[in-house]
Amino acid sequence: MKFSQGVEWGLHCAVLLAQTPAGTALSRRALADRYGLPEAYLAKHLRALVAAGILHAVSGPNGGYQLGKPAAEISALDVLDAVEGAASPFVCQEIRQQGTSALPPEQCTRPCAIAVVMAQAHLAWRASLRGVTVADLVERLPEAVRTKTRGEFS
Amino acid sequence: MKFSQGVEWGLHCAVLLAQTPAGTALSRRALADRYGLPEAYLAKHLRALVAAGILHAVSGPNGGYQLGKPAAEISALDVLDAVEGAASPFVCQEIRQQGTSALPPEQCTRPCAIAVVMAQAHLAWRASLRGVTVADLVERLPEAVRTKTRGEFS
DNA sequence: GCGTTTGTACTCGGATATACTGTGTCCGAGTACTGCTGG
DNA sequence: CCAGCAGTACTCGGACACAGTATATCCGAGTACAAACGC
């Protein structure tokens, strides 16, 4: 089980865009070069972020990507859901109702205990990520890094 | 991002084995038939559980699998780690140190904030699963199901 | 000199190939029981 | 009748194909600017 690299890329891009002056857009080329990423592949993930409303894409010269809403309203979970999909990694196949010793439906009124446990863990994971916004991530950057970044867009 | 089906299979098998009288072993054939699973593929996952010490395999006639330790000492996390591997699904590639605006190493003494957030979420997820044992899962089964299962091994 | 038009260069978006992990399967090694054989 | 032995049937374990998704890429659609042209 492994996340797509797009998760890290999307989060870094969002954090970077949150530090740019309002109204400025960064082209995908600029983002890819900055982090040494394959531009065309990065595009696929950025497109997913645009579809989720996290980023806003502007066409034409001087176009590019900018945040689609305030950084404080974008959680890490939002980015992850946009890139990886919000579906639970565990999908209960109800094998208790299959095979030679299948349980009859009337004994399966309550959800499978195993699925419940996995769902709870999934919720805990999501809750942890939901509590952190892109604005928080910017705050947690070292001051030196923030000033360096700010200088590049002055 | 999706878990292997082996996670569900392994958990169900562990819960079932926890309900069998001590000393009895269930063959992989019996397990596969009971849940309608592909026997040969189930074998691959059971082998992983054996390697992790969660199950114990017995060869020969009347052989099969049994729990490798008390059900109360096997957490859901143990099973998941055995099947999926314990590695974090998020692997930080340190892209902040790559590309045209790469940060110098002296500004990267603290771990990347994004990696920290992801690691915390991962820990929350693992903690949730670590708190539930196979014995707990047996307890959470409906009484009717437990008696039905018990009857099949009398 | 000014407005219009055309061209260009730059942007994002969707459709298209390749690599790797999960899925599924097969055959071989080992072991305990069972039946037979010889005493 | 009993002990030893060989055969057999059943078990798990590792090596081998197939499929789906992540990875990586290319080309086309759209837009704003800029320069050129006509008035």
Image (tube, coloured by chain):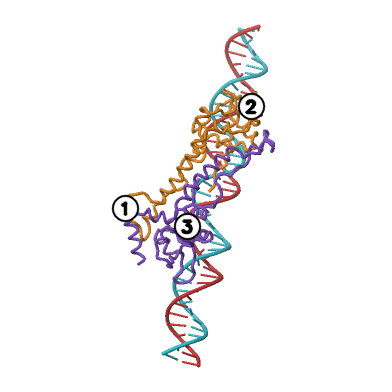
Chain colours: A purple, B orange, C cyan, D red
Crowd band around label 3 with a 10 angstrom C-alpha radius: few (<14), some (14–19), many (20+)? some
Discs 3/2, front: 3
Q: Both on one chain, marks 3 and 2?
A: no
Question: Looking at the picture, which amino acid does disc 1 mark?
Answer: Pro
- Residue name at image x 58 percent, y 31 percent: B139
Question: Looking at the picture, which amino acid does disc 2 mark?
Answer: Arg
Corner quadrant of residue C28: top right
* Element assignment for label 1: helix
Using the numbered discs, state the Cα–Cα distance from disc 1 to disc 2 in whole angstroms.
Answer: 61 Å
Using the numbered discs, state the Cα–Cα distance from disc 1 to disc 3 in whole angstroms.
Answer: 31 Å
Residue B105 in percent (x, y) is at 32, 53
Residue B70 in percent (x, y) is at 52, 27
Please tell me the numbered disc located at residue B105.
Answer: 1
The answer to whether B97 appears left or right of A59 in the picture is: left
Question: Looking at the picture, which amino acid does disc 3 mark?
Answer: Glu
Q: Which residue is mark 2?
A: B150
Discs 1/3, front: 3
Q: Which residue is mark 3?
A: A73
